[in-house]
Image (tube, helix red, strand yellow):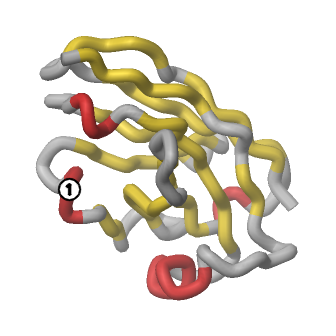
């Protein structure tokens, strides 16, 4: 099971940009689908983006399409989330997660507990208006 640590969050004005990183330790990163999730105050956690092991299958939730970009560097065991044109409604704690399935499998199952899935502890993103 991977150990995941997010970084890169912070306070930014609306319209600004942030780049989140998720560093993984463990041998299975390059074979894992990775996802970014967020949880706003008083709301449930929701998926933001996902990328398969080799980066040729990517998913975005509609609300971030055209503004956010997920990418990964398997040599560095790191997945990124470039966030541009940030809006106050993007304010949330952002989490990364790994999953041994493909993107479709992660989208279907991420709400259910799974021993082979790992979660980071999150990084706070606050967008001021």
Can you give x and y, in whole percent of width and height, for residue 23 in the image? 67, 36
Depth order, front residue of 110/3: 110
Give neighbour class at mark 1: few <14, some 14-19, many 20+ (Cα, 10 Å).
Answer: few
Residue under the point 61% across and 76% down: 111
Residue under the point 50% across and 47% down: 42
User: How many numbered marks, from 0 up?
Assistant: 1
Relative to 71, residue 55 above or below: below
Relative to 100, residue 67 above or below: above
Q: In the picture, residue 82 is in which quadrant?
A: top left
Q: Is residue 13 left or right of residue 76?
A: left
Q: Is residue 107 left or right of residue 114?
A: left
Residue of label 1: 63
Which corner quadrant holds the N terminus?
Answer: bottom right
Q: Is residue 50 left or right of residue 78?
A: left
Residue under the point 52% across and 59% down: 44
Q: Given the current orientation, which residue lies at the most extreme front position?
A: 42
Q: Is residue 87 left or right of residue 42?
A: left
- Kind of element beneath mark 1: helix
Q: In the picture, residue 100 is in which quadrant?
A: bottom right
Which corner quadrant holds the C terminus?
Answer: top left
Can you give x and y, in whole percent of width and height, for residue 66 in the image? 12, 49
Depth order, front residue of 101/128: 128
Can you give x and y, in whole percent of width and height, for residue 101 in the image? 62, 82
Residue under the point 82% across and 46% down: 3
Relative to 85, residue 98 above or below: below
Can you give x and y, in whole percent of width and height, for residue 31 in the image? 66, 68
């Amino acid at each position: 099971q991977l150990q995941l640590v997010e970084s890169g969050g912070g306070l930014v004005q609306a319209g600004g940009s942030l780049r989140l990183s998720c560093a993984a330790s463990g041998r299975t990163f390059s074979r894992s689908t990775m996802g970014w999730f967020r949880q706003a105050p008083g709301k449930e956690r929701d998926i933001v983006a996902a990328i398969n092991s080799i980066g040729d299958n990517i998913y975005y939730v509609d609300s971030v399409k055209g503004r956010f970009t997920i990418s990964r560097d398997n040599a560095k065991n790191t997945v990124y989330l470039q966030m541009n044109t940030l809006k106050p409604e993007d304010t949330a704690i952002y989490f990364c997660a790994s999953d041994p399935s493909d993107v479709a499998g992660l989208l279907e199952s991420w709400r259910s507990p799974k021993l082979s899935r790992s979660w980071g502890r999150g990084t706070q993103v606050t967008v001021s208006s």
